[in-house]
Amino acid sequence: MTTIKIISPIDGSIFAERAVASDDALERAVNRARAAQRDWARTPVAERVHYCLAALDALLAMNDEMVPELARQMGRPVRYGGEKRGVEERVRYMAGIAEGALAPVVPPEMTGFRRYIKREPLGLVFVIAPWNYPYLTSINSIFPALMAGNAVLLKHASQTLLVGERLQQAFDAGGLPAGVFTNLVLSHDQTERLIGSGRVDHVAFTGSVAGGRAIERAAAGTFATLGLELGGKDPAYVRADADLGHAVENLVDGAFFNSGQSCCGVERIYVHADLYRPFVEGFVDLTRQYRVGNPLDPETTLGPMAQGRLADHVREQIAEARRKGARCEIDRPVEGDRPGSPYLGPEVLTNVDHQMDVMREESFGPVVGIMPVHDDEEAIALMNDSPYGLTTSIWTRDTDAAAEIGDRIETGTVFMNRCDYLDPALVWTGVKDTGKGAALSSFGFEALTRPKSYHLRSI
């Protein structure tokens, strides 16, 4: 029997171990899901939403257990209370717009004809979820897919397998009909074979660019639709008219929350030369206040990264930048910080440029580079000089300028005076190697349905 072990980043111990589903069990799950979806699609939208909200309530009731469980799985400090607030905000918003977003589209009236476009569910949605925000990234697809009338199969990341179990418990407690949602523990080979089988109608994947390419290869020829949220290298631009204190406080949090393991975390900052020195001083002072340690300790503000190999990638980026002339502004020893260890303190790099990997390629860890710029044109050129495009934040008192700059940035979301946030009323999408597709807002429902036209003539 093949198993998957959750190795806790806290101490390297095995926190949990789960058996990989047999091929027969996977086949039964797919058959059950496809059969259940047919009845589920005929269930009124309001009733589907009711089941989803009941599951949400059940999930929120588990939060006190989920928070330390999550710390043991992927290292986020318990002081931050898990992902409860974001999960509730997103699910309740999508529930609130579901009936309107899924309602038929009716064109102008034509005498003797009844015309409309229905939004039909795609069928079977396969969600492949990551470990970094394991609840938030999952529910972005799962709940809207169910509200739209699809059945859902979930494969969660091996680092956070217990999240899939919690979601299954929540849907079961909410009374969701059997087979409409199924959590599965699968191997990579099983995952690829399922995608390539032609029995999945949509794949929602959040992960690496390499993973996204593997999904596309596996799905080739099946005509399944894909939603891919992949890498990011999100920039921030602090203009000369920015509120310095506000920018420093929020960008430090945007860079280092969750140990920098955020799809839309800030990984590079461009500051107008007039503010550069005071910005760096304030940023460094605030960064030095982080306390790295055991995430189960309420005093810890920065936990370990999820895996030692991920921390080693950040260490390699920092070392390469230093060889090319970068200055480490923190360079503070952290207990347990050594090759192979997930414990890594936050680092701020100055004297950086785009010849350094840390300024163009994803870090996904607690490091950020800060560069001075002389005007908007230089900032725009540098922000676009990356293969990724998920979010951009602009720090200024001039809303018109932020909008105009945002128009020229290759990105999925433009923020002004905030960062590292997902607004469920706005579409979540990316460009370039960050992937394709849409989640949340009414666009999220469009990605999980297909249009079907009715042209009925009276005679």
Image (tube, helix red, strand yellow):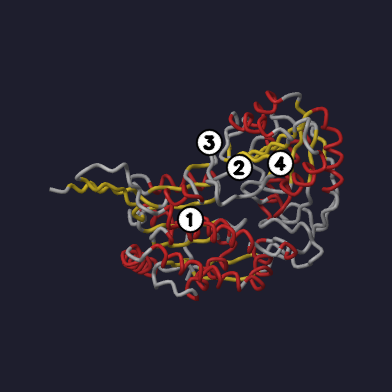
- Identify the residue position indicated by label 4 in the image: 417
Residue 440 rendering spot, x and y as whole percentages: 51, 51
Q: Which of marks 4 and 3 is nearer the N terminus?
A: 4
Using the numbered discs, state the Cα–Cα distance from disc 4 to disc 3 in whole angstroms.
24 Å
Label 1 neighbourhood size at 10 Å, few (<14), some (14-19), many (20+)? some
Residue 147 rendering spot, x and y as whole percentages: 43, 61
> Which kind of residue does numbered mark 1 sit on?
Ile
- Asked whether the beta carbons under mark 4 and mark 3 sit within 8 Å of each other, the answer is no
Using the numbered discs, state the Cα–Cα distance from disc 4 to disc 1 in whole angstroms.
27 Å
- Identify the residue position indicated by label 3 in the image: 432
> Which kind of residue does numbered mark 4 sit on?
Asn
Residue 419 rendering spot, x and y as whole percentages: 68, 45
Relative to 359, residue 151 above or below: below
- Identify the residue position indicated by label 2 in the image: 232
> Which kind of residue does numbered mark 2 sit on?
Gly
Using the image as rendered, state which of residue 108 and residue 130 is in the foreground. 108
Q: Is mark 3 on a helix, strand or loop?
A: strand
Q: Is mark 1 on a helix, strand or loop?
A: helix
Q: Can the viewer see residue 324 in this picture?
A: no
- Asked whether the beta carbons under mark 2 and mark 1 sit within 8 Å of each other, the answer is no
Label 4 neighbourhood size at 10 Å, few (<14), some (14-19), many (20+)? many
Q: Which of marks 2 and 1 is nearer the N terminus?
A: 1
- Asked whether the beta carbons under mark 2 and mark 4 sit within 8 Å of each other, the answer is no
Q: In which quarter of the image is residue 82?
A: bottom right
- Identify the residue position indicated by label 1 in the image: 97
**Where residue 145 is drawn, which disc sits there?**
none
- Asked whether the beta carbons under mark 2 and mark 3 sit within 8 Å of each other, the answer is no
Q: In which quarter of the image is residue 64?
A: bottom right
Q: Which of marks 1 and 3 is nearer the N terminus?
A: 1
Q: Earlier in the sequence, mark 4 or mark 1?
A: 1
Using the numbered discs, state the Cα–Cα distance from disc 2 to disc 3 in whole angstroms.
10 Å
Residue 47 rendering spot, x and y as whole percentages: 41, 67
